[in-house]
């Protein structure tokens, strides 16, 4: 036996691993986002493509630069910043001035992620942090939308897209209100089928509920997403908005409208489920989802804004550590100990 | 807690599903292993005090003869694994790298190697105390891997009682098939052992627990189950660590051992199936443990199999005999989930060795992955069979907040099954940190 001089490795058990790895999980999330992203480009043409590209590029470059500046190996390869970049792009109005897109992307990664300590420590979903800052800084630009499937969308750009940095955008006559705004400000309902398939105006990636659900189902099947979170968000939205709708159908939107409009699908499936910002215990996940659903309906119904998913998720992120603590499972044998003492 | 059922099979909550890797050896019958030119029998193979040698250097011994006696109650006897000459009584390396006293025994090359009988301990006439003494004298320890002296847990205090005896044939550790083969080939010994154990503990009934991946063993035990014994064979869902006794109690009885307590507190007792077989085989003959069944397996082993190997066989001799691949990279005693890596090939097989697994470079590659920060995915929380939060404990360990780990987060309940490290997508060495803490 040719063993002489051969060194055996000594490690402690376990000597095998499940094969799951952070980068494979993150890469699969990127895969799951591709159909939604492709649909966004298809629906909004060049403007959508530019918005998404600039969003992704600004996030990835910021992460890379911050890693270099702090003298650490770049963490771009773990795919997590790619998710942030794509999600961030998908939450933006596709006609947002590109310079604002880039500014928000830097904020996503620099403030939402790096400042908190990088991957694993980013208490809040970085994509939503960037978006929230933009919403506060540029409220008009962040609520001006173009309709999807415009005739010249692959050959021309909306006026606002190429606005010079640090100047206010101008809008052409083509802007249109989102289904949520239509409901909120003029009580005008949109057909559920249009909402589910994505034939409405809205942020780049929030319009097609079907494709979002498809991506979510893929991740759940691969055990890379906690199904309890979207399930609980949907359930709480349906129950709360359903009760309101039953009480007064003219004032309160139907549960189907609530589910399929705005950023709820995208938020529930891809953003609230961000592993870092969501609870680890199963009971915690149910509570977290219920809270997000509740806050979303409350903001949409009684708040000043037509949309509330973003703030609902950020609030959910904030209470996650507490949810984990409250729902700590009882350790094996703890019951017997109490009985004995 | 209620016991949980899924697909009609009993199990516990949480746990993981490592690849079983048992097919290559589960069909191979137990074969006798040859004697090494020099057997090194450590005098401490169990939890407790080292045994005291009762032979001298140069003395001739016969196979099965007692060569060391128990030093107090937390200790057991040792028996000669072969007829031969005691060459030395000196220190020898052990699995952890520590040197321990050992008997160096050189087998006679031409001997027939008959096993010497001692004073039988008859099932019908012996009292429980005599049986406990006989089990200690036979050197019986838990063969599942823990090597806890069996007679110690059989000594039931006057204020406690046992209603159910559980015989553990789960063998949830990947790669290992020793218990599987013992159940197929030694059912008579197992049932004899159960009769002794029932009498010692006063338990009313017995449950033999088998995982669903060994249907042949379950069927065989059911077919040979003596009609006068009160008990059953329970088939459990395949899941790691189903074979931990705490998991068995919750799956089979719906009872939880109190934190810091003993199985006796819930009137149950668990004994490994190979241990029961040894008791049933040895006590009627008055013999002691001098060999045991071991699975030698893993991608680096050429002639995998289940072997009856003399205690004290050096690991180097064992691996040379079965043949290993050129690119062998890691050798551990036991299976890959809880087995300890061998620090040297000069250590010997002991009573607690249930398997020898060898990995090649390529098989080991998967464990060399990059470590990422914790992303709070919660996989470990869903894996932990005793409902700890390994992620949180890992962060506390990294900050060396050991008192918080034990006082607020129940670290002492961890039995180091390694499920958390197995599932962690960030490859954080969670259980490894807990052991250190």
Image (cartoon, grey):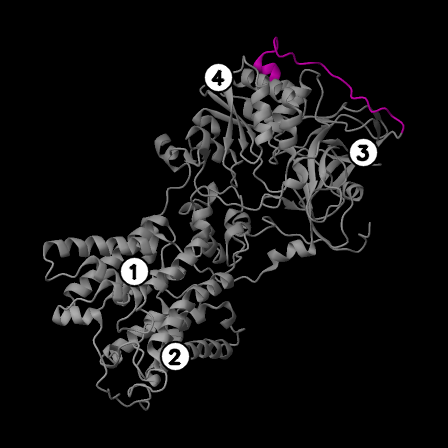
* Residue occupying the point 56% across, 33% down: B170
Secondary structure type for disc 3: loop
- Residue at image mark 2: A49
Q: Do badges 2 and 4 share one subunit?
A: no
* Residue occupying the point 33% across, 48% down: A283
C-alpha distance separating marks 2 and 1: 31 Å
Question: Residue A185 appears at what percent x and percent y?
Answer: 13, 72
C-alpha distance separating marks 3 and 1: 65 Å
- Residue at image mark 4: B204
Q: Do badges 3 and 1 share one subunit?
A: no
- Of circles 2 and 1, the one toward us is 2
Q: Which residues are magenta?
A: B110-131
Question: Residue A84 appears at what percent x and percent y?
Answer: 40, 70
- Residue at image mark 3: B34
- Label drawn at residue B405: none
Q: Earlier in the sequence, mark 2 or mark 1?
A: 2
Q: Do badges 1 and 4 share one subunit?
A: no
The outermost residue toward the right is B110
Secondary structure type for disc 2: helix
Does A136 sit left or right of B210 as displayed?
A: left
- Chain of the residue under label 1: A
- Residue at image mark 1: A316
Does B91 sit left or right of A141 as displayed?
A: right
Secondary structure type for disc 1: helix
Decide whether residue B364 is among the magenta residues: no
- Chain of the residue under label 4: B
């Amino acid at each position: 036996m040719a063993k002489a001089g051969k060194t055996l490795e000594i490690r402690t058990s376990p000597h095998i691993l499940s094969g799951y790895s952070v980068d494979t999980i993150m890469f699969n999330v990127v895969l799951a986002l591709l159909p939604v992203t492709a649909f966004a480009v298809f629906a909004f043409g060049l403007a959508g493509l530019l918005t998404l590209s600039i969003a992704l590029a600004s996030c990835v470059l910021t992460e890379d630069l911050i890693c270099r500046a702090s003298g650490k190996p770049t963490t771009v390869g773990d795919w997590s910043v790619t998710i942030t970049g794509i999600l961030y792009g998908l939450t933006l109005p596709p006609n947002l001035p590109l310079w604002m897109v880039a500014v928000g992307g830097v904020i996503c990664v620099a403030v939402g992620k790096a400042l908190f300590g990088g991957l694993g420590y980013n208490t809040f979903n970085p994509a939503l942090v960037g978006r929230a800052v933009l919403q506060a800084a540029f409220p008009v630009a962040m609520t001006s939308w173009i309709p999807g499937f415009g005739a010249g969308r692959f050959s021309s750009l909306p006026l606002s897209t190429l606005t010079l940095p640090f100047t206010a955008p101008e809008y052409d006559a083509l802007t249109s209100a989102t289904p949520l705004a239509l409901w909120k400000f003029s009580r005008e309902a949109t057909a559920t089928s249009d909402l589910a398939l994505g034939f409405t105006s809205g942020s780049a990636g929030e319009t097609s509920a079907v494709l979002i659900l498809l991506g979510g189902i893929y991740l759940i099947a691969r055990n890379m997403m906690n199904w309890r979170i979207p399930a609980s968000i949907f359930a709480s939205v349906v129950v709360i908005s359903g009760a309101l709708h039953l009480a007064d159908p003219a004032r309160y939107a139907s549960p189907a409208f609530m589910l399929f409009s705005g950023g709820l699908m995208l938020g529930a499936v891809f953003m609230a489920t961000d592993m870092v910002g969501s609870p680890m215990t199963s009971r915690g996940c149910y509570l977290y989802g219920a809270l997000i659903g509740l806050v979303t309906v409350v903001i949409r119904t009684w708040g000043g804004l037509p949309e509330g998913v973003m703030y609902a998720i950020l609030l959910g992120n904030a209470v996650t550590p507490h949810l984990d603590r409250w729902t700590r499972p009882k350790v094996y044998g703890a019951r017997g100990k109490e009985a004995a003492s | 807690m209620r016991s949980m059922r899924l697909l009609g099979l009993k199990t516990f909550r949480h746990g993981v599903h490592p690849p079983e890797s048992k097919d290559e050896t589960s069909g191979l019958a137990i074969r006798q292993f040859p004697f090494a030119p020099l057997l090194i029998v450590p005098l401490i193979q169990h939890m407790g005090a080292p045994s005291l040698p009762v032979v001298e250097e140069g003395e001739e011994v016969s196979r099965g003869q007692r060569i060391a006696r128990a030093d107090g109650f937390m200790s057991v006897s040792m028996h000669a694994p072969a007829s031969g000459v005691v060459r030395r009584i000196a220190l020898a390396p052990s699995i952890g790298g520590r040197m321990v006293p050992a008997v160096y025994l050189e087998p006679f090359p031409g001997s027939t190697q008959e096993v010497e009988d001692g004073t039988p301990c008859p099932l019908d006439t012996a009292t429980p105390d005599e049986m406990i003494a006989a089990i200690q004298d036979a050197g019986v320890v838990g063969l599942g891997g823990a090597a806890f002296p069996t007679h110690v847990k059989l000594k039931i205090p006057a204020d406690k009682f046992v209603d159910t005896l559980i015989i553990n044939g789960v063998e949830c550790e990947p790669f290992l098939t020793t218990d599987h083969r013992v159940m197929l080939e030694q059912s008579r010994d197992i049932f004899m052992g159960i009769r002794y154990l029932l009498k010692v503990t006063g338990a009313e009934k017995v449950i033999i627990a088998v995982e669903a991946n060994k249907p042949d063993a379950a069927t065989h035990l059911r077919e040979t189950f003596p009609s006068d014994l009160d008990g059953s064979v329970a088939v459990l869902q395949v899941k790691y660590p189903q074979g931990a006794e705490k998991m068995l109690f919750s799956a089979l009885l719906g009872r939880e051992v109190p934190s810091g307590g003993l199985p006796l507190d819930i009137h149950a007792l668990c004994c490994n199936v190979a241990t029961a077989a040894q008791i049933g085989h040895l006590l009627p003959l008055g013999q002691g443990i001098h060999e045991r069944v071991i699975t030698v397996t893993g991608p680096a082993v050429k002639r995998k199999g289940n072997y009856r190997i003399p205690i004290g066989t050096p690991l180097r001799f064992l691996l040379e005999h079965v043949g290993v691949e050129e690119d062998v990279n890691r050798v551990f005693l036991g299976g890959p989930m809880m087995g300890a890596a061998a620090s040297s090939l000069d250590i010997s097989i002991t009573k607690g060795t249930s398997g020898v697994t060898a990995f090649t470079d390529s098989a080991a590659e998967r464990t060399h992955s990059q470590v990422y920060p914790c992303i709070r995915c919660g996989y470990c929380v869903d894996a932990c069979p005793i409902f700890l939060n390994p992620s949180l404990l890992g962060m506390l360990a990294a900050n060396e907040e050991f008192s918080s780990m034990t006082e607020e987060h129940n670290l002492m309940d961890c039995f180091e099954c390694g499920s958390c490290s197995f599932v962690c997508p960030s490859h954080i060495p969670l259980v490894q940190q807990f052991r250190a803490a």
